[in-house]
Amino acid sequence: MSVTATLRAGVTTASPEETQALAAAWAAELPAGTTVALHGDLGVGKTTFTQGFARGLGVTGAVTSPTFTVFNLHRAGEKTLIHLDAYRLGSEAEAEALMVEDFLRDPWWMVVEWPERLGAALPGDARHLELSILPDRRHALTLR
Ligand SMILES: Nc1ncnc2c1ncn2[C@@H]1O[C@H](COP(=O)(O)OP(=O)(O)O)[C@@H](O)[C@H]1O
Ligand SMILES: [Mg+2]
């Protein structure tokens, strides 16, 4: 079964490492030009997921929350990963002013935390992943 199919069915993980392994496997499966929108509250594992996703693309550097820069650019050979955290964006106009598309050198992948804050600036073909924490403390991931 593909990782996409697994995520569509819904999956739970018991550790950050498990979430990262899943994200890494998915990144290796997704074609260039894919935007992944990570939905869910603070602490559900959006940044943790992105760290695994980056590893899956071959990124070796540290991937941390781009809280102060809005987005971080990672390179792995010819691949570009944009990690955008829209938490602090005040408006859609502000999102458009980032001009992220100017950094999307082929082949690229983009992961967005707090994607709802991007409004129409979020690519229409983004894959939407819902993250949550279950009462038993496992983390749930479902592709919408
Ligand atoms: N199964 C799991 N998947 C992802 N993160 C987990 C899991 N279990 C515990 N965690 C912890 O939850 C926290 C998630 O934080 P973070 O990835 O920064 O969330 P967000 O970016 O959504 O605010 C991390 O401290 C991580 O170690
Ligand atoms: Mg985060």
Image (cartoon, rainbow, N blue to C red):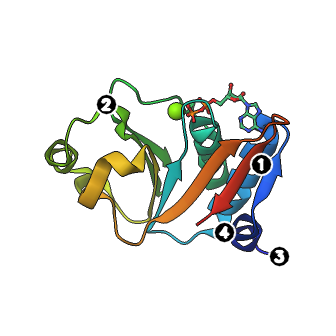
Closer to viewer: mark 2 or mark 4 = 2
Depth check, front residue: 65 or 79: 65
Sequence-first disc among 1 and 3 = 3
Sequence-first disc among 4 and 3 = 3
Closer to viewer: mark 2 or mark 1 = 2
What amino acid type should be assigned to the residue bearing mark 1? Ala
Find the distance from the CA under tag 2 to the CA under tag 4.
30 Å
Sequence-first disc among 3 and 2 = 3
The disc at residue 29 is: 4
**Which residue bears the numbered disc 1?**
21
What amino acid type should be assigned to the residue bearing mark 2? Arg
Instruction: Say what secondary structure mark 4 lies in.
Output: helix
Question: What's the residue at 32%, 46% (across, down)?
Answer: 117
Find the distance from the CA under tag 3 to the CA under tag 2.
37 Å
Q: Position of residue 27 (x, y in %)?
A: 63, 59
**Which residue bears the numbered disc 2?**
88
Closer to viewer: mark 3 or mark 2 = 2
Left-right relation of 8 to 117:
right
Find the distance from the CA under tag 4 to the CA under tag 3.
12 Å
Find the distance from the CA under tag 1 to the CA under tag 4.
13 Å
How many residues crowd around disc 2 within 10 Å: few (fewer than 14), some, or many (20 or more)?
some
Rendered view: 76 above or below 105: above
Question: What's the residue at 58%, 40% (across, down)?
Answer: 46
**Which residue bears the numbered disc 3?**
1
Rendered view: 112 above or below 137: below
Sequence-first disc among 2 and 4 = 4
What amino acid type should be assigned to the residue bearing mark 4? Glu
Question: What's the residue at 79%, 57% (across, down)?
Answer: 11
Disc 3 residue lies near ligand 1 with CB under 8 A: no
Q: Position of residue 140 (x, y in %)?
A: 73, 49
Instruction: Say what secondary structure mark 2 lies in.
Output: helix
Task: Evaluate if marks 1 and 4 touch, with contact meaning CB atoms under 8 Å apart.
Answer: no
